[in-house]
Image (tube, rainbow, N blue to C red):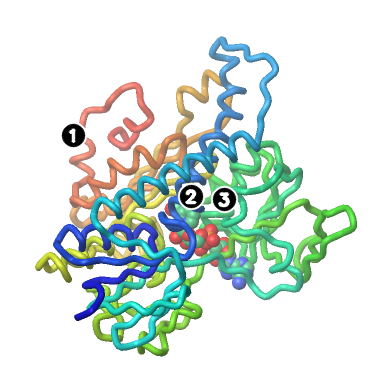
Amino acid sequence: MSDYDLFVIGAGSGGVRASRIAASHGAKVGIAEEYRVGGTCVIRGCVPKKLLVYGAHFAEDLQDCVKFGWDIEGKSFDWAKLRDNVAAEVDRLEGLYRQTLGNNDVEIFECRARLAGGGKVELSDGRTITADKILIAVGAEPFIPEIEGCKDHAITSNDVFHLPELPKRIAIAGGGYIANEFAGIFNEFGSKVTIINRSDQILRGYDEQMRDRLLQISMTKGIDFRFNAKFKKVEKQGDGSLLLTMDGCDDMEVDQLLFATGRVPNTQDLGLDKARVETEDRGAIKVDEYNRTTAEDVYAVGDVTDRIQLTPVAIREGHAFADTQFGGMDRTIDYDNVPNAVFSHPPIAGVGLTESEARNKLGGQIKTFTSDFRAMKNVLAGRNERSLYKLVVDASNDRVVGIHMIGPEAPEILQAAAIAVKAGLTKSDFDETVALHPTMAEELVLMR
Ligand code: NDP
């Protein structure tokens, strides 16, 4: 007899969902978490980041409101107030996550856990647990390349929510999601932001026109970019500032350096060898479509498997795992047409194939439709910032195979539009839908 039917390592999005669903199917479940319940998304990722994005956006709203007749005297921004309010909201959500686990009789172990082989898990408090099935859901952690002085002086997205004060000058290494989101946030708060990327593009994998538009708008807003630039050394100076010695661009002096150069599976010191759980090159746990690892009765979901590093994907994987193993169902995940967004200023959102992916995949048999427009609110506000929407259509059957957008509320709009792509709707279906006027989203059905 094992102590548990299921023991989960990591109480993030995937682990919590798997625990709750397995328990609802009648399993006896334990879960270990070494930090805080909720994982990256709730504690130091999507949720606090989005709250900072909202906070930052007021900077523009407070400028734009003047043209709408509002006159706000003496406006000022208090970083500590926002930071602490966000932290309090994170505490509240963590409480709800704990409550959910408790309500489902999932026992929480607040310590680090590692596999010991043979259905055993060792806890850092000295206990050993046995379980019929073990689920690894430990997520990923920020990757910082080996550069002299970097590990000592650079911060990552883990630290950014706790800064004692706003940096006057911040350099952000990387040109992906996190770099562009925090560039927007700090720029709106008044920091001087420089993005430094090793390649000559931002947001690799996103539709080229959307990336170009974000780059152009970001530069107009005052964000600096250094491309094809490499870090040689990072040193702390007497006044507390950081000296960045660079290759490919001028050296730079900043107050903070944020590294956003990807996230790697959190598989170190997890006892994978003992349990014979194999990993891929980047340390990701190898799994099959049912989240089975190479070891019997050991499973993995979420970022630790490095399939698609997104919260809703981890949640689905955790849910499918629990339904399959404990609910008598046969469930796998469809990874096609997963919508995604970058909460930059303005945000980008996309689903399906980009134009170049569609060209490669469909042998050039595609049509594209774009709408390049200035949102009504921006026009009155005198904000010269244009939105861009694009439909990518398979010319052989008229199906919309990709939607890409940059502009205010793009992620909110795209979530609904993604249903149409997932359902395989055609450009004619879009055309036949009457516009909802006046909205930005109506552009989706007005492109000809
Ligand atoms: P990304 O993979 O988005 O971007 C990484 C960036 O770092 C790229 O610009 C890449 O350059 C650069 N880079 C990679 N390795 C190195 C290196 N060794 N030296 C220098 N530069 C390097 O990673 P992020 O850290 O921004 O985000 C991690 C993941 O978290 C994302 O992939 C995403 O899945 C998830 N996430 C999702 C969000 C959302 O859904 N809104 C928000 C935040 C994170 P190059 O241009 O050459 O590739």
**Foreground of the two, 423 or 136:** 136
Lower sequence index among marks 3 and 2? 3
Q: Is residue 33 above or below residue 189?
A: below
Q: Is residue 272 above or below residue 74?
A: below
Task: Report the amino acid beneath label 1.
Answer: Glu
- The residue under label 1 is 432
Q: Which mark is residue 286?
A: none
Judged from this view, the residue extending furthest toward the right is 238
Q: Quadrant of residue 52?
A: top right
Q: Residue at x 31, y 22 (%)?
A: 437
Judged from this view, the residue extending furthest toward the front is 126
Task: Report the amino acid beneath label 3.
Answer: Asn
**Foreground of the two, 302 or 173:** 302
Residue 83: x and y, percent?
Answer: 59, 40
**Foreground of the two, 70 or 283:** 283
Whether label 3 lies within 8 Å of ligand 1 gets the answer yes
Residue 142: x and y, percent?
Answer: 55, 65
Task: Report the amino acid beneath label 2.
Answer: Gln
